[in-house]
Amino acid sequence: MGSFSLRAEQALQRITGFAEVVLASSGTTALIAALLAMDLKPGERVLVPSFGFVGLPQAVLLAGGIPHFVDVEPNTLSISRRQLTKQTDPSIRGIVLIHYGGVPADVSPIVQLCKSRGWFLLEDVAHSLGALHADGPVGSFGDLSIFSFDYQKNIQAGEAGAVASHDPVLTEKLRNATSLGVNLRAQALGFNSKWDWVSKGLKGYPPDYVSALLVGQLQEFNEIQGFRKRIYLAYESELSAWARQNEVLLPQRPAYAQESAWHIFWLLFQTREDAEDFTAHMLNRGVRVEKHYSSLRSTTLGSHFPRGDTPVSDWAGNCLIRLPLGNHIGEEELVRIVSAVRAWKTQS
Ligand SMILES: Cc1ncc(COP(=O)(O)O)c(C=O)c1O
């Protein structure tokens, strides 16, 4: 491992509170490594949100399991605790939970549920590094956590990710899974001088020059978060009256959520027609806004896997629009975006 990769891991340890963090070539690689470390048996299911990143069910499949789609909560768009409670299939092994958009999910009761059912919990922190739940930092609740630093995330190294666990046995498995199943880490630490192929794995670590970009970004972590927070709060205060008038839902900040990671500012329209009309309206005013995930259970491959009812995921898949958010947005641009949003619908 190169010196920048070591420095990136140390910086992530400081930010996340994990004693060890394993760098990965992407957040998706981190998901695959995490699920490989869970040693899924054929036929075992992992619950994933239907409104979620396609890499979740993909990683479950690649690790030998079956994804099972569950709906999300309307206020946070993270996996629904009530729907999880209803899942009783004996082949369920665990849950992947996304803290969607940077808002902490209502994770404490889900931890209790996992304990009572003997399920593992994998926290997907791709959107929410630095977010704080009243019961602890996001990413500190599960058996494992993954992080992403691709070009769309708050911290951007082009293409990189990380995975971590508080359990040293799992951490060793994560190291092996990202090192082609070879015990490279144990060798480096001198625990075992013999090169050994010990598990399934992939070539899953980033090149050192990518880690160098990551180190630079992590040094700016507080500034980056602060910048996004300012824009997010400006959207929140400038658009809440407009949203009420037009029956558009904005992201909520539940009482237990002490700090968001300010990753996505979303608008949830009542109908697909409104979402499409709004997108065209914004484009006419020179502002590009974007949808996010499709509800995975309705996709060509996703429709073959088990699922519950997913009305909220289907709604968000059709009707959620993301406003621009990032350090390219200056004061004038912010004013322009806000006035373009406010000109929709209430004027007609
Ligand atoms: C929730 C979530 N998890 C994981 C990932 C995977 O990250 P990466 O793009 O680094 O592979 C993404 C990517 O957008 C994501 O949205």
Image: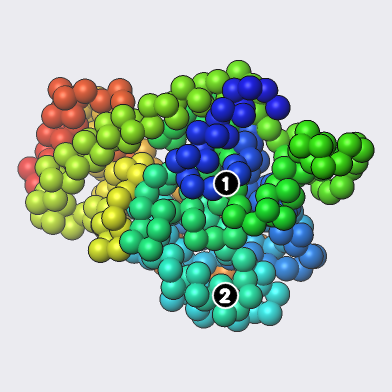
For label 2, the residue is 115
Tag 1 secondary structure = loop
346 relative to 293 in the view: left or right: left
Residue 38 x %, y %: 71, 59
Mark sitting on residue 19: 1
Q: Earlier in the sequence, mark 1 or mark 2?
A: 1
Residue 125 x %, y %: 48, 48
- Vertical placement of 280 versus 100: above or below? above
Residue at (38, 27) in percent of width and height: 220
Closer to us: 150 or 344 = 150
Q: Name the mark nearer the viewer: 1 or 2.
A: 1
139 relative to 291 in the view: left or right: right
Residue 257 x %, y %: 31, 58
Which quadrant holds the N terminus? top right
Image colouring? rainbow
Q: Amino acid at mark 1?
A: Ala
Q: Amino acid at mark 2?
A: Lys
Which quadrant holds the C terminus? top left
Residue at (38, 63) in percent of width and height: 135
Mark sitting on residue 66: none
Residue at (60, 44) in percent of width and height: 20
Residue 175 x %, y %: 72, 42
Tag 2 secondary structure = helix
